[in-house]
Amino acid sequence: QQQVKQSPQSLIVQKGGISIINCAYENTAFDYFPWYQQFPGKGPALLIAIRPDVSEKKEGRFTISFNKSAKQFSLHIMDSQPGDSATYFCAASIRGGKLIFGQGTELSVKP
Amino acid sequence: ETGVTQSPTHLIKTRGQQVTLRCSSQSGHNTVSWYQQALGQGPQFIFQYYREEENGRGNFPPRFSGLQFPNYSSELNVNALELDDSALYLCASSSGTLNYGYTFGSGTRLTVV
């Protein structure tokens, strides 16, 4: 019940395309859903986050869509660029506590 | 000084040995968490310290232990190293215990041979 399931495991997108990564959770006590971006040799960096009281949050080219009834949330990267090539992790936590991470999605944006 | 810094960046140890990893929290952050990230996996929560006290622990055996110092820097100690302990160890700091803004360091890559 503490798991966060992420898909796909890997994703290849053409430059300018839309990248979509999906996550699902079971524990309805989760109240914070961040997305992290990780480059090789680096730690995860917070990209964007959402609380369950809103259905969508947009920051620049990055959008989180949140479906509370389905217990799913997704990351959309518009106008994907080669510099976006990285591993993306969704996560969830309860009241700011430990982060439960998904398994990660390796995104490759082809020029 | 800003950001979370970890040392060393890479480390090779022999099975059965002990290791200490260090973390310097971001300025103003009094909470530190440690995560283990195996190759190709998401980070797994090890434990969290707030004001020098452990206030949360994940599913890791007691040979994983930690300390937080008055300046909020932290150590992760692992005794009796096993091959499966080979991973990237990440430190994350935040302000307070009910905080949603974790800052991660770049990690220490531990290899156990």
Image (spheres, coloured by chain):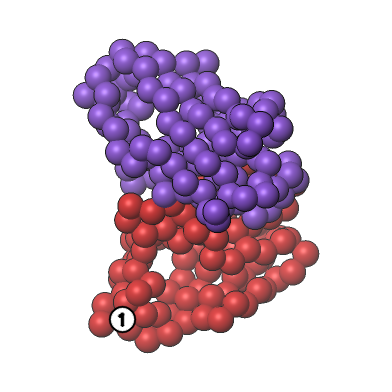
Chain colours: A red, B purple
**Residue B69 in the image: x percent, y percent?**
61, 29
Q: Is residue A88 at least partly visible in the picture?
A: yes
**Depth order, front residue of B74/A89:** B74
Count of numbered circles on the image: 1
Could you tell me if residue A72 is visible in this image? no
Residue at the farthest left position: B113
- Element carrying mark 1: strand
Badge 1 is on which residue?
A: A14
Seen from the viewer's position, the closer of residues B104 and A80 is: B104
Residue at 70 percent across and 71 percent down: it is A55
The residue type indicated by label 1 comes to Gln
What chain letter is assigned to the residue under label 1?
A
- Residue B5: image location, x then y, percent: 47, 46
Quarter containing the C terminus of chain B? top left
Identify the residue at image location x=43%, y=21%: B78
- Rendered-image quadrant of the N terminus of chain B: bottom right
Is the residue A27 above or below the residue A84 in the image?
Answer: above
In the rendered image, residue A28, in percent from the top left (x then y), is placed at 72, 48
Q: Which residue is at 57% across, 36% downward?
A: B73
Residue B20, image quadrant: top left
Q: Residues within 10 Å of mark 1 (few under 14, many from 20)?
A: some
Nearer the observer, B30 or B81: B30
Residue A80 in the image: x percent, y percent?
40, 80
- Residue B53 lies, with reference to residue B90, above or below; the image says above
Which residue is farthest right?
A53
Question: Residue A80 or B110: which is nearer the viewer?
Answer: B110
On screen, residue B20 versus residue A92, left or right, reads left
Residue at 62% from the left image edge and 77% from the top image edge: A58
| A20 vs A46: above or below | below
